Amino acid sequence: MLRRAVLQTFRQGLAQSFFKRNAVSLSETTVTHQPIETSNEADEKSVSKQKPGDESGNTVVVAPPEFRFMYPEFLPDPAMERRNRLKEKLERIDMLQRRSVVEIPEFYTGSVMAVTVADANSPNKFARFVGICIQRGGSGLRAWFILRNVVDKQGVEILYEMYCPLIQKIEVLRLERRLDESLLYLRDALPEYSTFPLDMEPERRLNNSVVPINPLKVKLRPRPWLERWERQNLQGVEDLNLPQRFYDKAEKVAKPWEKYDLMLQYRKTIPAEEQEKIFADVHSQLQQQEFKRKMRRRRGTDNEQ
Amino acid sequence: MSTLGLLRTLFNPKIVTPNAIQLQSLNRSPFLVGLFFNHEQVRTMSRVKRRTTHPPYWHVLKNNQRQDEKISSDNLRFVREVIQDKYKNKSPIKGSDLDIEKKEWDPKTKRSGVIARNIGVQHMWEKDGKKVVCTVLHVLDNHVIRYVPPEEYAKSIIGAKVFRNRKPLGCLVVGAEAANPDRFTRQYCSLFNEVGLLPKKRLARFIVTPNAVLPPCTPLTAGHFVVGQAVDVYGKTIDYGFQGVVKRWGFKGGPASHGATKFHRRGGTIGTGRDKARVWPGQKMPGHMGSERRFCRGLKIVRINMKYNVIYVKGTVPGPTNSIVQIFDTVLPRRKFTEAPPHPTYFPPEDGTLPQEDIWDSSLHVFGSPSISV
């Protein structure tokens, strides 16, 4: 995480494999304009790709395609009735302002994070919570994520709003992904899968280029469960060992035609051209912020020396 | 005559003269109330006309019925040139150019309002960390079209109703959102001929006192308002279409199970059968819901962005996203202005520099500032 900016160039070369693994949230319309660069060509220091130039001859900066996974809250709510370009633009300006004060790192469902929040009721006025991110959602300034942990044999989940000014610090202790986009089944799983020490140290990753996918298969407690997990096509759960009638009913209730429904996918996503515009808008500012933070950290270590 | 009617005449000996209008008097003596009447219920929704789907008859026809005119591309270009010549872009009006008599502001002044579009809802946070839901209103390109003086306005149909027992005030016609004259009729475009502006998609009238009059062609921007003031917002509520009785009036309906046959979201009984022996006017039934005129009073302005002409208002506003609303200074007596606002309106400084692009209320947490520590 600390030297990601330098090693980010190598990620470009592996972007293709990254895409193949994470094809769940992609719509069929997401086509990158440029061929994926191999690691030989990705020698430029800057992360951004430069388009060969539009008609006027100016180079147009395009954000790398990973941005739609790293910063999904910059994409607005796809419902057309409530969309307005000016409002989205103003909201993005506010989001970048907030990000210039607090570092909101890249994280995914399945990452272990620690959040420090200003709390009037706690003894030292700050409350720190460590947990695994089981779900994230919302768009714009309403973006949120849920952290789960088991404290004193009691499962605890806290929903944090990413842009709330009470949040002092967000650290990612372990950056990884799981096989599912939503880990709500951890509520019905054995408690050891949700337990993380509250004084956990941030883990250094050996390979900074690709976010690893943890292929862990979680064991669930015996029934009753909070939801009908057999109907949800979960990848990260061990074999449920249910009587056959559950699976028969799940088949009856299933909607196998949805994977062919192009309009459904279209309505749920923002078109690729708009995504590019949004991230190109946001990309340069985020790069600048990243750079400033790096300099501040270096100056910090220099001062220590 | 019914028994009830007979009893009424016995207890209400009023001499009815042929020319007098007979008043409906209710005899509320406890004897009769207990014996014969259930309380006289007044169903207030009975005679209220809640919405119209057509404009008033004195409005001119607005939108052009687009015929499929087969015009050659040369002629189309010529038409566009004619339009451009007719509505040549004027330079923005400066405060010094207008001949506004410098009238003083007093607490009884009514200023003009502004037409805006509700572009959505954004969450902001106060300085103690409390989340606040704010509606974002984009002030469109407003221009004053004309002024109707008090004497003339009091003679019009609406003006006569409004000022029946009051001292008459003037009325400013403001337009917003310039559009291509092609889509409008000639009569509608002629409304803008005096001012020489491109015809506007939306017109509104704001009642003003004579000392807050603005000359035609004056632009109105977000700077017309002050951060921290209270405003009233008029809009038309979300149109839900034809809705059933549960959603429209909040009825409870019937049980979902336990043998209920075809009675889950119905109204049930609509009358007693004894008193009146008919369905009362105003009985709550399914029907069209929404698309009604509503005012949200006393909303506080928490942030103004002068560059994009956007106002952030604390709370929500009637109407769906991307609908047009009208904003004006509040009528609530305890939230009115104590100091003079930009009167009669705000004019940007002559040298073109903005004094401050983004003005925040003191209670809000500005996003670029450090995190809140309690």
Image (spheres, coloured by chain):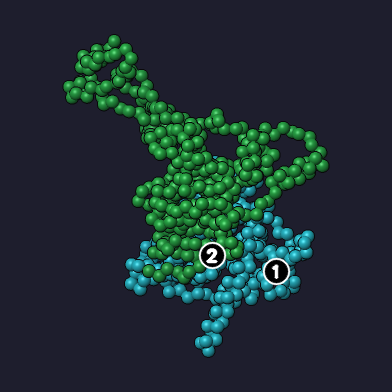
Chain colours: A cyan, B green
Q: Quadrant of the image for the C terminus of chain B?
A: bottom left
Residue B184 as seen in the image, left or right of residue A223: right
Which element is circle 2 on?
loop
Instruction: Identify the residue shown where x is 24% and y is 12%.
Output: B6
Location of residue B365 (image quadrant): bottom left
Residue at the far left: name it: B31
Q: Which residue is mark 2?
A: B355
Location of residue B202 (image quadrant): top right
Question: Which amino acid type corresponds to the residue marked 2 in the rendered image?
Answer: Pro
Location of residue A286 (image quadrant): bottom right
Q: Which residue is mark 1?
A: A13
Estimate how packed mark 1 is, as few (under 14), some (14 to 19) or many (20 or more) residues with alpha carbons within 10 Å: some
Instruction: Identify the residue shown where x is 78% and y is 60%.
Output: A55
Which element is circle 1 on?
helix
Instruction: Identify the residue shown where x is 63% and y is 42%.
Output: B194
Q: A251 and B264: which one is in front?
A: B264
The tag on residue A80 is none
Where is B251 relative to B143, above or below? above
Q: Determine if residue A37 is in view.
A: yes
Q: How many marks?
A: 2
